Amino acid sequence: MHEVTAENTQLVDLVLDYSRRRILDTDTPLDKPLAPLELARLAGRTIHEDGIGAARAVSIFEHALAPACITTDHPQYLSFIPTAPTKASIAFDLVVSASALYGGSWLEGAGAVHAENEVLTWLANEFGLPSGAGGVFVQGGTLGNLSALVAAREAARLSAAEAGREQPSRWKVVCSAEAHSSIASAARVMDVEIVTVAPGRDGALRGEAVREALAEHGASVFAVVATGGSTNFGIVDDLASIAALKADHDFWLHVDGAYGLAAMLSPLARDRFAGVEHADSAIVDPHKWLFAPFDACALIYRDPEAGRRAHTQHAEYLDTLTEASEWSPSDYAAHLTRRARGLPLWFSLATYGAAAYREAIGASIRLAADIAAEIAARPGFTLVRDPQLSIVVFERDGWTKADYDAWSQRLLDEQRAFVVPSSHAGRPNTRFAILNPRTTFAQLVAILDSMQ
């Protein structure tokens, strides 16, 4: 299976040929899921004792399996949070796999870790974090948030022990009622209590509301989670007023910027994130608005040693690594084995430069403002909130959930767009999540025109 043979050469050529065509294609269809029975009929049985051969397997993937997956980098994929990886990042993702890299330790992957750390240092500097801040690329925002909160609780435990204070019977984390679902998920995994605080009418969490929660729950609060761009609306919490509470209260400030923190790279949105420089940890997902392929989340600690204390795994076979002083990414999150998933972003940034990223992010912000103005001016449409970043939520007046469902399905069936229904405060609506630089105003207007 591993020798350089004519069969293996053909196999590699087949895969690279398909990859080349897919990477360079600018007109990949949206595609859509198929029913299980239909997909089974089209793909047939593919796992046999003797195999079906590379040519047949690639053909089945290209003609049966891939068309049953919605194309997330399509310019009219506007649901959830899209992805729009650069050609450079996609191409280099192949290199990461082909190079048999292990990204868990400096001993085994020093070059890869060095490149990833350059990106993490650059991001930390953009966010205003001090020299020495750093972290690791993990799978996604859920793991990033969990890892940060584990480090936060460990820091609180150590602080209480050093001060001789009694530890609470149950630790608590404070967050907005509109915080991402991964915060509640992390709390379940950690067996800690969530204290939700109502945001303002505009959806933003503010220091005054957080102060009340801190006063009520006291030393049992080990962390406050602020959101740097909510998934549903793209709302940025008032980070500065929340961070100011650290002067009077002892807590770890974590900023969940999985979607929105990348907007800080654009001068159009940078001011919205004032206060993030005081965070003890923050995350941002490059596979969202930093144009990298799935899957990557940058987890950055103000003091990386806090992450290392919480996450370093100890075992006899790991002594060589844990006794060393070099930077091993496995020490900074709830993982051990890891892919060098930050390298595609490194290659893309090195290739195109940071200015290209700033412009692409700014273009999405401008487009969101333009289409929001169009929606607000249209009879029969209601803009739910003015967009802060690149998510535009709106209603078609008089529509029920069934109307949105039927319209959304029709758009996908006709391969015009992927826009799914959403809701807020019990009312159905829909939303444009605009991250792809190839999305145009005309495309969005055409989708609005379809809402008859």
Image: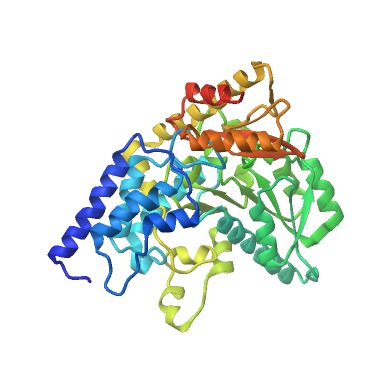
Q: Residue at x 21, y 70 (%)?
A: 2
Asked where in the image residue 201 lies, by quadrant, the reply is: top right
Residue ranking furthest to the left: 6
Which residue is drawn at the image coordinates 76% and 64% (left, top)?
171
Q: Is residue 253 above or below residue 204?
A: below
| Residue 412 drawn at (x, y percent) | 51, 37
Which residue appears at 78% of the width and 70% of the height? 167
Question: In the displayed structure, would residue 181 be above or below residue 219?
Answer: above
Q: Residue 334 appears at what percent x and percent y?
A: 55, 66
Image label count: 0
Which residue is painted at 63% across and 29% down in the image?
387
Can residue 238 be seen from the camera position used here? no
Tell whether 206 sits left or right of 107: right
Please state if 323 lies on the left or on the right of 1 as rendered.
right
Residue at the far right in the pictured view = 216
In this rendering, is residue 171 above or below 275? below
